[in-house]
Amino acid sequence: MSTIGRLYDGLITGLAVVAGLLIWAMVIAMITDVAARNLGLPGTGHTYALIEYSLLLITIFGSPWLIRKKGHIYVEIVFQALPESAQRKLATLIYFLCAFACLLVAVYSFGETLSAFQRGVMETRSFDIPRWIPMSVFPLGFLLMSIEFLRCLFGLNSLYFSTHDKPSKSEP
């Protein structure tokens, strides 16, 4: 595997680890906030906003890894009813459409993030931050998801077939 491939794999895994750590951080933050209120101590007031941002990060950071590990939800009932040659064609179509849709969202969200940055739009919660900061994860996340679907499209991974089920060179 090339250095770029290893770095990319490390990025996908690293983002998934960050997503997992954020889940634990959210649990600890909620328990701490509830315990403080029940003990009559003042809460931070920022817990809920931070949890909302964490939910966004968990979703975006974990999605490329879930695609790679086949951990997302997909319906196979129609797929399994088709003959194998049709399954392969349908899988190719699905990979293309998913990669294209994710790439469109990445490009659009990049434009929206850039626009929010240029206009200086602020996100107002219990604390104010520039809106482009939470928005900036969308272009990255959807670009990585698009890459994962392209890996499937070009045969480096498969959502429907195990690696030993890949067609041989002699199959059409």
Image: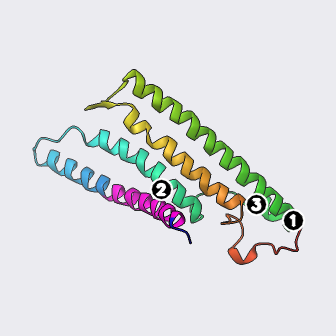
Q: Secondary structure at mark 1?
A: helix
The tally of labels here is 3
Find disc 1 in the rendering and name its residue: 85
Q: Earlier in the sequence, mark 3 or mark 1?
A: 3
Q: Nearer the viewer, residue 111 or 7?
A: 7
Predominant secondary structure, magenta span? helix
Q: Secondary structure at mark 3?
A: helix
Q: Earlier in the sequence, mark 2 or mark 1?
A: 2
Q: Secondary structure at mark 2?
A: helix
Q: Which residues are magenta?
A: 4-24
Q: Nearer the viewer, residue 76 or 34?
A: 76
Q: Quadrant of residue 89?
A: bottom right
Q: Amino acid at mark 2?
A: Gly
Could you tell me which residue is drawn at 81 percent across and 62 percent down?
A: 87
Q: Amino acid at mark 1?
A: Ser
Whole-percent x and y of residue 136? 43, 39
The residue furthest left is 40
Whole-percent x and y of residue 12? 48, 60
Decide: few, some or many residues near mark 1? Use Cα within 10 Å; few <14, some 14-19, many ≥20: few
Whole-percent x and y of residue 17? 40, 62
Q: Earlier in the sequence, mark 2 or mark 3?
A: 2
Could you tell me which residue is drawn at 77 percent across and 52 percent down?
A: 93
* Horizontal arrangement in the rendering, residue 55 relative to residue 86 (left or right): left
Q: CA distance from mark 2 to mark 1?
A: 32 Å
Find disc 3 in the rendering and name its residue: 77
- Residue mark closest to the camera, 2 vs 3: 2
Find disc 2 in the rendering and name its residue: 62
Q: Look at the picture and state if 99 lies above or below 153.
A: above
